[in-house]
Image (cartoon, helix red, strand yellow):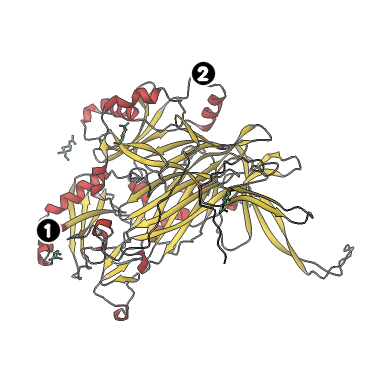
């Protein structure tokens, strides 16, 4: 979705080496995100190497080129030895070409360089989008169109939208621009100047197309405001802020976080945002940490809009690969985005000139005391005694919010003492609005591609598909993926073996299959009774069950676009809710490496054509959760959060309840335990 130009004002360009001392004394981890000083070093090395071609080189993406998993794991067993080489992956544009450069920070040199000759372009920088949005404001034909509509140019703001790919042979790096009218509202996305569309060539920073097709009344500013300072009475309901008595009980050593029985590494990447690594859980019986998850992050977020007309059809966004989910992260607001006692972490990415940009308070970490029950039981059968045991549930949440133009995505990673990791997503922000002539539903006799939410304002139907990369290492790398089907069995009364005939006619039981190859692992989940797990086929509990983790899937939303429609050919990884691939360091992003204007030749679906063996291998689980979004009036002018998510939950991983012997501190708030009668 579009880049909001105002956003860059929040960011402070971080200048030079201040933080080095504080960083170098922290414990080093090979998966640590690139630090501000490392970004500066990368910039220096790249500029030196490409000095002949001057500094027109732009850094589109700079991220950690992580060492191979085997290298990291073997180094961790003998940390006194030399750590794995520290390298960065740079996607750069130079002279209208895309370069894929690997920089070696240890030797301060270019490790490898490749020109990308295939289809697709790298992630867009926020600055080039802002520049394009500002460039068009001086364009004569646009100024004339605005004047012709009787509007004031000083109230016009423009926003950029990736162009997608619709079979064009010629590959020019372009972006489409749509303009909006503010005039007293901060909610510009709901006031489109319908009919006006510009195309800007980003390599030349030149307007290459201009359209003014329609005259549609501008949706009203009235009723679109969301700033508390501009809203008028009546207000309500009154909500108490989040009161938390505790200091969050976690420790952070470098980027490694320990909390309750969990330990994990937290990193940040410009393209995908939060990256969790090496999550392990302490097992009281075995008196050691056991491995669960090697790496997890949102690898792509596909958002196709369902309006095939001239000014909208191209709106089929890949928020990670095109806009950068991490780059779009915003500073979090204490006591609203996160509870008052949350701990905040700053995040960094490379700006277009390679200089680090600081997103302050990009991530927050807090304990969630949601008033839930961890487990309980009341026993009344023992005469003369009533036994009640109850334990309060507490979890640790890592949160990030990414604002990709009009939409805000809240991403939560929640660690639970009982062994689950919950992945949550919240959708909020402003809907994509299309201006129409209609002011009442009864006037509409055609398909307008979404519901009318206010006069002259249609909110376009769309989807959100989030594809998570989940590299589980359940008690080690060698894992298998199992499908357990619940099947109905008939109980036959004349069965020869039936010793006791009961009146029951049926029951269900389980049939488990170890999935052998990639093609058998891709699944469309419906309402089928199916249990999915990643198990360690080489390890069993004392009573013989395979050690494993279950996937409790999130909302499944099978794509409704036809398979031959361009956006769907670029996002075939959404055709299934679950995929399993063997670990391969370079298969990181479900949408492929170069997603802007990609042509569907590099993505998760293509990789799986090899139909590799996945049994007793180091495997990666990919899970897509989806939302078909039919907007409603409550979502205007700004949308209350809609949430979804999924869970990884231990299944025969522990010998018994891992929180049986949990100790909780009881807080007593005076006057809080009063009882009334119903
Ligand atoms: C660098 O970019 C500027 C502005 O687009 C252009 O005028 C100049 O020719 C470019 N230089 C090279 C060497 O490409
Ligand atoms: C802009 O807002 C002012 C003040 O509310 C109003 O008088 C004017 O008509 C508005 N102009 C347009 C073009 O909406
Ligand atoms: C990032 O920005 C925040 C807020 O301005 C500041 O407190 C912090 O020191 C900055 N971090 C670095 C490394 O500059
Ligand atoms: C995948 O493995 C299954 C056995 O689990 C086998 O029946 C199937 O033919 C294999 N698929 C391919 C395409 O090899
Ligand atoms: C890893 O994946 C890439 C991209 O799919 C492929 O080109 C490469 O051959 C794979 N490497 C191995 C060892 O399978
Ligand atoms: C509240 O709980 C405390 C401690 O258990 C107890 O002493 C007190 O009597 C309770 N008050 C009420 C109103 O139940
Ligand atoms: Cu939506």
Q: Nearer the viewer, residue 474 or 177?
A: 474
Question: Image point 22% across, 30% down: which residue?
Answer: 53
Query: SS of the residue at dot 2?
Result: loop
Q: Which residue is mark 2?
A: 81
The label on residue 239 is none
- In contact (CB < 8 Å): disc 1 and disc 2: no
Quarter of the picture for ligand 7?
bottom left
Q: Which residue is mark 1?
A: 153
Question: Image point 25% across, 30% down: which residue?
Answer: 15
| Whole-percent x, y for residue 110 in the image | 35, 26
> Left or right: where does residue 304 sit relative to residue 29?
left
- Mark 1 or 2, closer to the camera: 1
Could you tell me which quadrant the C terminus lies in?
bottom right
| Whole-percent x, y for residue 476 in the image | 61, 35
| Whole-percent x, y for residue 2 in the image | 29, 53
How much space separates mark 1 and mark 2, taking CA atoms? 63 Å
The answer to whether residue 484 is above or below residue 293 is below
Q: Nearer the viewer, residue 472 or 440?
A: 440
Could you tell me if residue 136 is visible in this image? yes
Rendering quarter of residue 74:
top right
């Amino acid at each position: 979705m579009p880049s909001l130009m105002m956003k860059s004002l929040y960011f402070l360009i971080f200048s030079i080496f201040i933080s080095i001392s504080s960083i170098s004394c922290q414990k080093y981890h090979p998966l640590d995100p690139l630090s501000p000083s490392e970004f500066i070093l990368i910039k220096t090395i790249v500029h030196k190497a490409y000095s002949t071609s001057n500094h027109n080189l732009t850094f589109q993406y700079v991220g950690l080129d992580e060492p191979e998993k085997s290298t990291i794991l073997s180094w961790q067993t003998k940390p006194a030895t030399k750590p794995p080489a520290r390298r960065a992956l740079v996607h750069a544009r130079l002279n209208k070409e895309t370069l894929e450069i690997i920089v070696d920070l240890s030797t301060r040199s270019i490790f490898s360089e490749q020109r990308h000759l295939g289809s697709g372009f790298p992630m867009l920088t926020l600055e080039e989008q802002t520049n394009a949005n500002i460039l068009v404001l001086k364009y004569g034909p646009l100024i004339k169109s605005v004047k012709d509509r009787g509007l004031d140019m000083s109230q016009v703001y423009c926003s950029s939208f990736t162009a997608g790919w619709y079979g064009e042979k010629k590959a020019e790096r372009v972006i489409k621009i749509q303009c909006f009218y503010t005039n007293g509202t901060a909610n510009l996305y709901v006031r489109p100047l319908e009919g006006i569309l510009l195309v800007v060539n980003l390599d030349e920073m030149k307007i290459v197309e201009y359209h003014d097709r329609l005259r549609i009344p501008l949706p009203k500013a009235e009723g679109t405001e969301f700033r508390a300072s501009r809203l008028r009475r009546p207000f309500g309901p009154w909500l108490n802020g989040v009161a938390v008595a505790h200091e969050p009980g976690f420790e952070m050593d470098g980027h490694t976080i320990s909390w309750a029985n969990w330990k994990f590494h937290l990193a940040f990447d410009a393209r995908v945002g939060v990256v969790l690594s090496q999550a392990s859980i302490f097992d009281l019986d075995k008196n050691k940490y056991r491995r669960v998850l090697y790496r997890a992050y949102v690898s792509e977020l596909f958002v196709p809009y369902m309006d095939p007309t001239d000014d909208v059809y191209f709106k089929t966004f890949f928020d990670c690969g095109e806009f950068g989910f991490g780059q779009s992260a915003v500073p979090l607001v204490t006591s609203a985005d996160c509870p008052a006692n949350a701990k905040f972490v700053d995040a960094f990415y490379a700006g277009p000139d390679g200089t680090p940009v600081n997103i302050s308070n990009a991530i927050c970490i807090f304990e969630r005391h949601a008033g839930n029950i961890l487990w309980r039981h009341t026993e009344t059968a023992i005469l003369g005694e009533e036994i009640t045991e109850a334990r309060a549930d507490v979890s640790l949440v890592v949160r990030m919010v990414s604002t990709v133009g009009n939409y805000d995505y809240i991403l939560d990673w929640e660690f639970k003492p009982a062994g689950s990791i919950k992945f949550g997503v919240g959708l909020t922000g402003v809907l994509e609005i299309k201006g129409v002539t209609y002011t009442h539903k009864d006037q509409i006799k055609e398909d307008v591609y979404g519901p009318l939410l206010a006069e002259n304002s249609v909110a376009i139907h769309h989807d959100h598909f989030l594809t998570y990369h989940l590299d589980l290492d359940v008690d080690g790398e060698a894992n298998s993926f199992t499908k357990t089907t619940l099947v109905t069995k008939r109980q036959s009364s004349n069965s020869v073996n039936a010793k006791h005939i009961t009146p029951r006619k049926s029951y269900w039981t389980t049939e488990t299959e170890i999935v052998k190859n990639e093609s058998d692992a891709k699944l469309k989940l419906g309402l089928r009774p199916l249990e999915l797990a990643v198990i360690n086929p080489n390890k069993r509990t004392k009573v013989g069950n395979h050690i494993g983790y279950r996937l409790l899937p999130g909302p499944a939303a099978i794509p409704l676009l036809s398979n031959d429609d361009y956006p769907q050919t670029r996002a075939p990884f959404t055709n299934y809710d679950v995929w399993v691939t063997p670990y391969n360091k370079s298969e990181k992003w479900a949408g492929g490496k170069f997603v802007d204007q990609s042509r569907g030749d590099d993505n998760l679906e293509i990789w799986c054509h090899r139909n590799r063996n996945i049994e007793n291998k180091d495997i990666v689980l990919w899970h897509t959760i989806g939302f078909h979004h039919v907007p409603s009036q409550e979502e205007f002018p700004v949308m209350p959060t809609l949430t979804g998510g999924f869970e990884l939950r231990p299944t025969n991983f522990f010998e018994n309840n891992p929180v049986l012997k949990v100790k909780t501190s009881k807080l007593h708030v005076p006057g809080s335990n009063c009882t009334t009668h119903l």
